[in-house]
Image: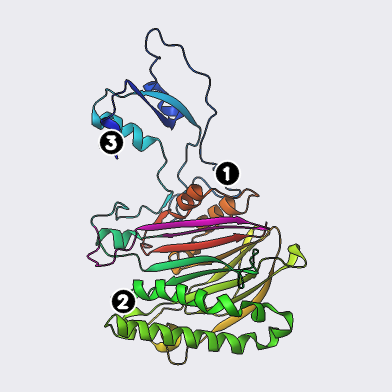
Amino acid sequence: MSSERDAIPQEEEFRLVPKRRQQKVTDPPAGQEAGPPIEPLGLRQPEPPGVPQELSPGTTEPTLAAVDTDVRPVVVDAGKADDERGQERDAAFPEPLTYDDPKLSSEPRGLPNLSTPVPDTILDGAALAGLTIRGASIRGDDHRFYAQPRQDSMGIWELRTGDAEKAGAVLVCVADGVGSQPHSQLGSAAACQILSDLLRTEYPTVLDPSFAPRVPGYAEGLVSRLSDRLTTLAAEWRQEPKSVSTTLVAALIEAEPADPAHRRCLLFKVGDSPALLLRQGGFEHCFTGPVDEVIASTATHALPARFPQVETMELRLGADDILVLCSDGLSGPMHNRAVTAQLVAFWGNGQIPSLPEFCWQLAFRAKSYGDDRTAVCVWGR
């Protein structure tokens, strides 16, 4: 990309750099009038309420890095040396927050040796009627360091019947490929897609209020069918079913509820990928089971499985609620209260982040937590 820009003759290039870098500003060339003022741009970084900026000696709780978000447009001399211009580009966007001095670099050291490439990061979202969705799946520092693929996957779909113009439901899901299995990135991606295919025609029945007592039994049958298809795919890939093992957590959400302030959501999961509800300034676990259970290769805790263990629950999503589906790459570091407080400040401050902001917020780095990190957040407005 830099080679294309450098090939175009130009005297100046416009860059966005933090205010503290404005000693790099140069005046417009002689004889050229300054253009109209440009509106300042920058990341919205609310100050996290109640989070300590400094800690007493001897404590192990990390501090939050100060982030300079006062970003203004300046003119950068295109004739400067490449290394000097590179430093200015690095300053144009703040590094993700860090906790406890993580040892590994987040810079990918190489590309995974795969016939079908898996992107390092995926980012998605939507602004729907009464719902706003943000989702990101980010390769962890460990996989980046060892040139291994991201094993997490996610999916966001609007579901509609036939040629209907309006969607009847929204499906969001997160799958966390089991780290010890060599092809779990295939299983996690396939699990999300298969789930969407199965629910595309069945969701009207599932969301019918009269069907509520039958949802737990239906969920077990649904996941069993998903598991069978995943096993078939593994055979087509000439792999053992165990090698594509993955967890799965999903939410089926009413697209047009009778009462938008109490939108019905059906949740189900296999394995340890949690669902959280951010409500009134704190996170609540949607499922009652342990969220830190270590995923082994047992069939009851990961897909594909002959008799999968499925948890289900129903909740009402209010206008001020945020539903969060995630992998343990996020729920793990949330044991640190500073991480949790920062996420509450990011997502629960009344302002919904843009897609790039959301990805940056989720890309924080924490010592001992180098796993892939995936989250899909649904705001009830």
CA–CA distance in space, label 1 to label 3: 36 Å
CA–CA distance in space, label 2 to label 3: 42 Å
**Residue identified by numbered label 3:** 4
Q: Which residues are magenta?
A: 111-137
Which secondary structure lies at badge 1? loop
Q: Quadrant of the C terminus?
A: bottom right
Give amino acid for label 2.
Answer: Ser
Q: Quadrant of the N terminus?
A: top left
**Badges 2 and 3: C-beta atoms under 8 Å apart?**
no
Which secondary structure lies at badge 2? loop
**Residue identified by numbered label 2:** 180
**Residue identified by numbered label 1:** 46
Looking at the image, can residue 55 be seen?
no
Q: Nearer the viewer, residue 48 or 379?
A: 379
Give amino acid for label 3.
Answer: Glu
Label 2 vs 3, first from the N-terminus: 3
- Tag 1: Cα neighbours inside 10 Å, few (<14), some, or many (≥20)? few
Q: Is residue 135 magenta?
A: yes
Q: Position of residue 346 (x, y in %)?
A: 56, 51
Which secondary structure lies at badge 3? helix
Q: Residue furthest top?
A: 31
